[in-house]
Amino acid sequence: MPEIRPSVTSQDILCAEVAAPPNAIVVFGASGDLTRRKLLASIFQLSAQDLLDERFYLLGCGRKKLSDDSFRKAAQQAIRESIDHVSARDLNSFVQRLYYIDGDYEDIGFYQRIKAKLAQLDKKHKVYDSLVFYLAVPPLLYPAIVERLGLAGLACPKNLGTKRQIKLVVEKPFGRDLKSAAELNEHITHCFDESQIYRIDHYLGKETVQNILMFRFANAIFEPVWNRNYIDSVQIIIAETVGVEHRASYYDQAGALRDMFQNHMLQMLASVAMEPPASFEADRIRDERVKLLRSIRPLKIEQVGDSVVRGQYGPGSINGEQVVGYQAEPGVEPESKTETFVAARLFIDNWRWRGVPFYLRTGKRLAKKDTEIAIFFKKVPHSMFISAGLDDIPANVLVLQIQPEEGISLSFQAKRPGSKICMSTLNMDFKYRNVFLVEMPEAYQRLLLDCMLGDQTLFTRYDGVEISWKLLTPLLETWQQDDSTPYLYRAGSESFAEADKLIESDGRKWREFSKM
Ligand code: BG6
């Protein structure tokens, strides 16, 4: 297997991270799942890497009654659960910068108390009102919180002519369809300017998703073949083994199309298919993403079954363990029609991609955790080895493996030692783990740091959100109105007959889950 080693060049100097300026984060939903599973550990890692200013603090806001001390204890436990080796000293000193306040999100009095607490904390930490408000709450609460932040005078539209730098981080999904996304945006933009809004799609913070742009646009050899002349089709897969977990109250109202497809899947598609931006600036990159999303051919609703298939997991077994079907999960409606799997064929109507099918597939309770983008190149136009029986030479496949084993692999044909015409498919593999010898940082770490630094490159802009809902809202409405139900698939499978038909009717096959 070819060995890949990073060579040290003067460019490596760029690898040094810039530390965040003095600021504080106010987390709504501080006693919730996202804070416990992702945010606290990511912020702790930033602190452990000296990327937070010494004045940094975090104010957690939640419904649960907690003292500063009990919040700190819970935070310590959450961080230990997420990170393997934690220095007790670092952790103890980190949690001293955490504070907590409880209240009711609908009550304006809560925001007055938050304001007073921030004023008091500012005396000690002196971040001069440079604040990030992070909404780690169920999306239904976004409007109420944003409106009250405005009413309490905490929002400060535009950050103009003031030392205060206020930002708002909003988790996905941004709205549930085109109309609700527009309403939510209007609500938010009453109190915050677009330049202050950081809409999270955590896939954009994953190292391997960021790498798609580097791979495509920092190498001259791939772009010339990155188009309809050389590429036969593209597959984008996000397969998960987990089920709905304890998020039924959210997920049963959302489903895979809203939860994964409208955001993570389409953003990966945009990264792999967009045109080269002129520079690595937030808006130049976001312009190209939006332009690409705008070029996706609208789905023909009358024939939607030909290009989109939805499924729901039934009982089965994952890694040898029996698991219940979706409808038997705690909190899920017994006859729920919510889809946990979506497969789709999309076309991009522009010069580069016209006629190339993009097959997208995402689902919960599948056989393996596997996120990857596979680029299938066209076969050789003519086999000169036909007289020796080699008339169907496999095409090259380039796989950008996003997780869990991050890497890149390119398959190609080569002569095997032995008889004169003896050929094998080989893989040129590169694995981040083997080459860079580091743990891949959590996506939230990147995104939180970028937000504090005021860099919006990896956050979605409203026009991008709008265009993706425009594409998918007619489909959601059709699903809601018609009597059809998602196909049932066995938990632990890779796919199912109806989803296979979607791709096999084009003479292609789903790629097997990665063996990397
Ligand atoms: C979240 C979805 O955005 O992404 C979850 O809401 C999903 O349903 C998760 O499980 C997957 O993220 P990752 O980083 O584990 O691939």
Image: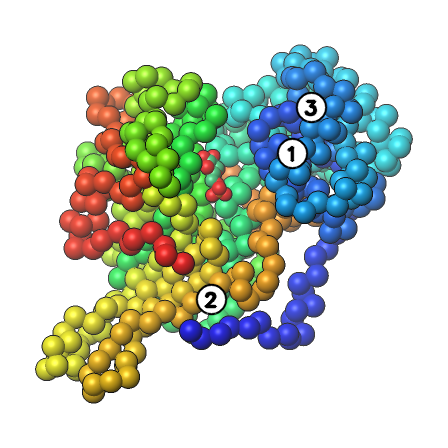
Q: How far from the left and from the top, in percent, is residue 183?
A: 49, 25
Q: How far from the left and from the top, in percent, is residue 482?
A: 23, 23
Q: How far from the left and from the top, in percent, is residue 122?
A: 85, 31
Write down the residue under mark 2: 430
Quarter of the view holding residue 377: bottom left
Q: Residue furthest bottom?
A: 420
Residue 274 appearing in the image:
no
Amino acid at dot 2: Phe
Q: CA gap, disc 2 to disc 3?
A: 43 Å
Answer above or below: position of 16 versus 426.
above
Quarter of the view holding residue 309: top left
Compare residues 501 and 11 and report the one nearer the observer.
Answer: 501
Amino acid at dot 1: Ala
Write down the residue under mark 3: 61
The circle drawn on residue 78 is 1
Residue 281 appearing in the image:
yes
Say which element carries label 1. Answer: helix
Q: Residue at x 34, y 32 (%)?
A: 322
Q: Is mark 3 within 8 Å of ligand 1?
A: no
Q: Quadrant of the N terminus?
A: bottom left
Residue density around tag 3, few if under 14, some if 14–19, many if 20 or more, within 10 Å: many
Q: Earlier in the sequence, mark 2 or mark 1?
A: 1
Q: Nearer the viewer, mark 2 or mark 3?
A: 2
Q: CA gap, disc 2 to disc 1?
A: 33 Å
> In the figure, is residue 102 to the left or right of 417?
right
Q: Nearer the viewer, mark 1 or mark 3?
A: 1
Say which element carries label 2. Answer: strand
Compare residues 106 and 407 and report the one nearer the observer.
Answer: 407
